[in-house]
Image: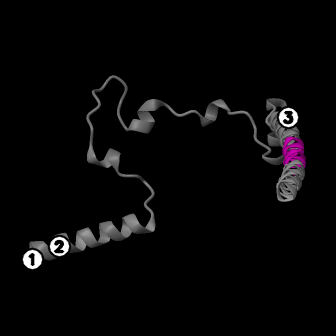
Amino acid sequence: MRSLCLLAFGCLVGLFAYTYDLKIKTRALETDARELITALQDESDFLALMRAEVSYLSRPERIEEMAKKTLKLEPISSQQLVAWSAVTGTVTGASVQPSSSFATPVRKDGIAALIEKTSLQSAVSGER
């Protein structure tokens, strides 16, 4: 009988220790959850602040004012407009036919010039 009482008392102490450990772990998890909720609220507030900042910075009136100050641009004048026929090189009313000169750019970069130079050299050496 005495051993049964000791066994019951041992089980009771074990259950008490397990319950206490469970209580400590639960409180630690609740603290972590509160910290995460606080961090989430802080991030949400920061996101709202950044959205407000972006909307403030991208206002058309503000951008226009900054462009006038820093770029010093002026409105386009009529002398800057060019007729379409001057751009395409054709007379108005004439039929437009695609040409190989239309596809090549006026300004060539270094690589394009090197390719053209080597292709001309190979064409000249191929004719000989």
Q: Which residue is mark 3?
A: 52
Q: CA distance from mark 2 to mark 3?
A: 65 Å
User: Image check: 122 left or right of 35?
Assistant: left
Quarter of the image with the N terminus in it: bottom right
Q: Which residues are magenta?
A: 26-39
User: Which quadrant of the figure has residue 67?
Assistant: top right
The front one of 27 and 116 is 27
Q: Residue at x 84, y 35 (%)?
A: 48
Q: Residues within 10 Å of mark 2 (few under 14, many from 20)?
A: few
Asked which secondary structure carries label 2, the reply is helix
Q: Kindly identify the amino acid type of the residue bearing the numbered disc 1.
A: Arg
Secondary structure, mark 3, is helix
Q: Which residue in the protein does label 2 denote?
A: 124
Of pointers 2 and 3, the one earlier in the residue sequence: 3
Q: CA distance from mark 2 to mark 1?
A: 7 Å
The image quarter in which residue 53 lies: top right
Neighbor class of circle 1 (other Cα within 10 Å; few <14, some 14-19, many 20+) is: few
**Earlier-in-chain disc, 1 versus 3:** 3
**Residue 54 counted in the magenta span:** no
Residue, disc 1: 128
